[in-house]
Image (cartoon, helix red, strand yellow):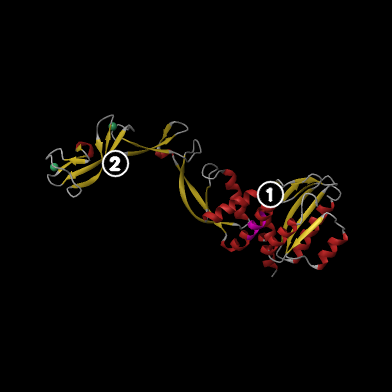
Amino acid sequence: MEVRRGLEARHGIEERLDLYRRPEVRRMLYGMLSKGDAEFDVSTSTLLGSKDQALAEGMEKAGILVRSSSGSIVKDPATGRSMFMVELVCPYCKSSSITREEMLEHRDCGFIGRLSEFTVRGNRLYCPRCGRPATKTSIRRIGIWFRCRRCGQTFHKPEVAIYDPERRSAVPLEQLEIVDRIRYEINPELREEIRPILDLYSTVESRLSSMGFSLEPLGSIKGISGVTHEFDIMIHAEQVSLGIDVLICEDQERLLQSLLRLVTKYFDLMGMGVRVLLAVAPRPPSAARSMISSTNLGNLIMAEADSISGLMKETEAKLTRLSPSTM
Ligand SMILES: [Zn+2]
Ligand SMILES: [Zn+2]
């Protein structure tokens, strides 16, 4: 039992909330929920960028994301880049000035030649050997042939050359490094938790925006003690500011601890023109209630529910009753 509680403490919802409250985490999760997954390059460059990669690694540590599968990409170690242009070049003289043409066989006479060798009259093709029309049934596609404009050679398969458009130079194939590619997906066990939490934040944000407030995600303000306090979302009206916190806990013990920490923060902001809306789930026990009421926090509004979706409705209802004048 002790072990399980230890695990919960490390992988509990409180720790994940520290990430969920960050707007960039919510953006990434929304994107992943709509697409199903996301891919990241373990190297510090390309694809989704190093910032997103560091974020994804943090989310993996917290158990929000899991690595699902990996493949590889190529990278030029000299530049760190993985985005290249592919050039098709002549295998004889390495020129990229090549043309690509379809090879056709005229079944009636056995002539084999390039499409451009056939004569076009009106919208019909005529065989250059026998002069008869090349119809759908009398013509057979043989394949693609390439011709080098520089040396005049024709060939089946051009060589592939990798070209770095930024450096404007070719990159030798043997110079390229193979780098693991990591694919992350949302931990399936947390899908039921993530969607309602994202909805909770987006409901609060859109409600406040529709009331005409401009939002400051992770806004901060200095308390009487000189300590700077951060809120999940802050809004500033003419006379007062409103800070919004979301607190979701798995067990009552943790809930009490977190509430105590928050009450201390709110107490430090009393008389500073800051009102606070605390959205908390589950409903705090009576001991917590009496602790809060004994502090006489005049600046605190609480939205409480026993489920995250219930909390969303409750928080929205509390916000609806607020207006710039009643704040
Ligand atoms: Zn050539
Ligand atoms: Zn013919």
Counting from the top left corner in percent of width and height, residue 61 is at: 62, 55
* Residue visible at 73% across and 60% down in the picture: 317
Q: Which residue is mark 1?
A: 209
Decide: is 51 above or below 298. Answer: above
Instruction: Determine the secondary structure under disc 2.
Output: loop
Q: Earlier in the sequence, mark 1 or mark 2?
A: 2
Q: At label 2, which amino acid type do we have?
A: Lys
Asked whether disc 1 touches disc 2, contact meaning CB atoms under 8 Å apart, the reply is: no
* Residue visible at 80% across and 50% down in the picture: 325
Q: Is residue 78 left or right of residue 95?
A: right
Counting from the top left corner in percent of width and height, residue 64 is at: 61, 57
Q: Is residue 49 left or right of residue 160?
A: right
Q: At label 1, which amino acid type do we have?
A: Ser
Magenta residue span? 196-201
Identify the image quadrant of residue 291: bottom right
Check residue 320 for magenta coloring. no
Q: Residues within 10 Å of mark 2 (few under 14, many from 20)?
A: few
Q: Which residue is mark 2?
A: 157
